[in-house]
Amino acid sequence: MIAPVGSGGALALGGRPGPVCMVGAGYVGLVTAVCLADSDIEVRLLDVDRDRLDMLREGRTPIHEPLLDELLISVLRRGTLLLCDDAAEAMRGAQVAMIAVGTPPLADGRADLSFVRAALTSTVADAGPGTVMVIKSTVPPGTTASMRRLCRRNGRQIPLAVCPEFLSEGSAVKDFRHPPQVVIGGDDRSACERVAQLFAHLDAPVFITDSTSAELIKYGTNAFLAMKISFINEMAQLCEHTGADVGMVASGIGADTRIGRAFLGAGLGFGGSCFPKDVRALDMAASYHGQSFGLLRAEVEVNSQARSRFVAKIQKALRGTLAGRRIAVLGLAFKPGTDDMRQAASVDVIRHLEDLGANVVATDPVAVPNAARMLPSTTLVGDPYECVVAADAVVIVTEWPEYRSLDWHRVAQLVRRHIVIDGRNCLDGDDLVQAGFTYISVGRPTRHPISKSAGRWKRQAADLVGQPPARSMRIA
Ligand code: UDX
Ligand code: UDX
């Protein structure tokens, strides 16, 4: 166990409220708690999962998040982060209590609020006169207003605000320190301002508004970013029909500052613990009010098509049959920089390939343990070079930088067929074709091997994909 050095940690600095009680040591709660503690506010982190708390007490994080491990050890040593499994202890003297428990989707797509309700009820009982309760979890519009009644004690209304997070996995610590904005919603202005003080050391615009608008800022942000991804994936399909290059198209469109290049990366679409569930939950919230939010349904539909179209691309590259073919899948996590497999494209793609009779061997730098629970019948290996041995096709599903810098000449010696299908448009086509590969990506023209010694392969590959041998392709 890591014990604090020096006494008592920091209470309140320069008017910044503290101590803070954080409920939920998941991606959001843990990162937020550690970063607040790192800014010299005393934080008590409460979680029902005792194994998770024990792990944290040993200075180990249950999630793969850059910078978090060393920061955790530092705040435990400084005594600004305390790990609690008793709500009364965690709430003693707390000026702010933040609820960051999961809001997983229900079968119909609505957000399951039972954990938020339980966490709120179990902590508000120990709230002191000056405590502000804050919902940090992502909750549908109207939730905070409807839960205010849970925060009445002995006839006294304890302020309840909402403060949505905008942390991306894989860069959560950096995102906390440099947020695009801080959003706080509530009907008690001074309570919201006190919560805003927690982030006063960060250089970010602070929006204080009513709680429902704040909830919709969060959902709207995620839904809009997801829409950009679905839009560019639809454009990618049109690029394939017309011979255009979606990478260039996205850069051209994104150069318009009214649009921006961010989140115009074509490929296998969005996954993760947030976009898929938040888009559906927002759609359900709209239907609850009798509104058919067509855009949201379209972006979900486009997202699932991106995955099935990718499998069709692999089938076409291997002459339409996958039975008995060995497919090497590079990348399992829903995106690089995390071990999170929630709604990862790899699961859909691999299950689809296996349903079509393929033998899949897959790898990932960090997500193999989590993937093993979701893909029990898939061969999972740690080393990408081991993964590609005797492969009929190498498929990129997560754009880890490790794969971009693979020795593709070495890979060329290990595979059975020289075909790479890149679902994230992250590889350098020149490297691939010089190593003798046919390089197929999303929304971009297929590249064919150019080296003389690859001539033989060139004919072989062209035969394989049923096209006449192509003149060497010059990419704009
Ligand atoms: C968070 C938000 O809660 C969610 O709304 C948002 O969409 C994404 O980020 P996340 O941090 O990913 O979710 O949740 P998760 O990783 O599932 O962690 C939740 C933690 O809360 C777990 O450690 C769980 O043990 C804990 N928990 C859950 C409690 O301590 N008490 C509860 O009652 C329920
Ligand atoms: C997202 C939001 O970015 C964050 O602000 C919010 O708090 C939580 O949800 P995260 O889920 O960690 O964060 O991942 P993000 O980097 O946004 O990517 C989401 C998905 O979109 C990933 O599957 C990623 O591969 C995909 N994506 C992202 C694309 O397909 N193309 C892009 O251009 C960007």
Image (tube, rainbow, N blue to C red):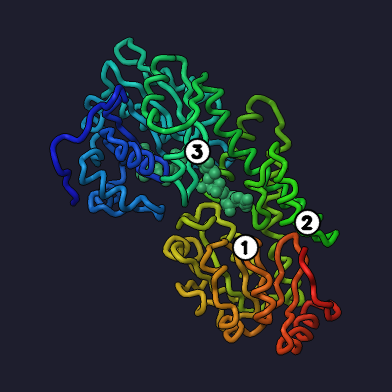
Label 1 – label 3 distance at C-alpha:
25 Å
Residue to which mark 3 is pinned: 166
Instruction: Name the outermost residue toward the left.
Output: 7
Closest to the observer: 413 or 262? 262
Label 3 – label 2 distance at C-alpha:
30 Å
> Which residue is painted at 47% across and 75% down in the image?
383
Precedes in sequence: disc 1 or disc 3: 3
Residue 188: x percent and y percent? Answer: 43, 14
Instruction: Name the outermost residue toward the top.
Output: 155
Q: Label 1 amino acid?
A: Cys
Residue 250: x percent and y percent? Answer: 72, 51
> Which residue is painted at 41% across and 30% down in the image?
117
Q: Is mark 3 within 8 Å of ligand 2?
A: yes
Disc tally is 3
> Which residue is painted at 57% across and 85% down in the image?
414
Q: In this rendering, would 395 be left or right of 79?
A: right
Precedes in sequence: disc 3 or disc 2: 3
Q: Label 2 amino acid?
A: Gln
Q: Quadrant of ligand 1?
A: top left
Rendered image: mark on residue 237: 2
Q: Secondary structure at mark 1?
A: loop
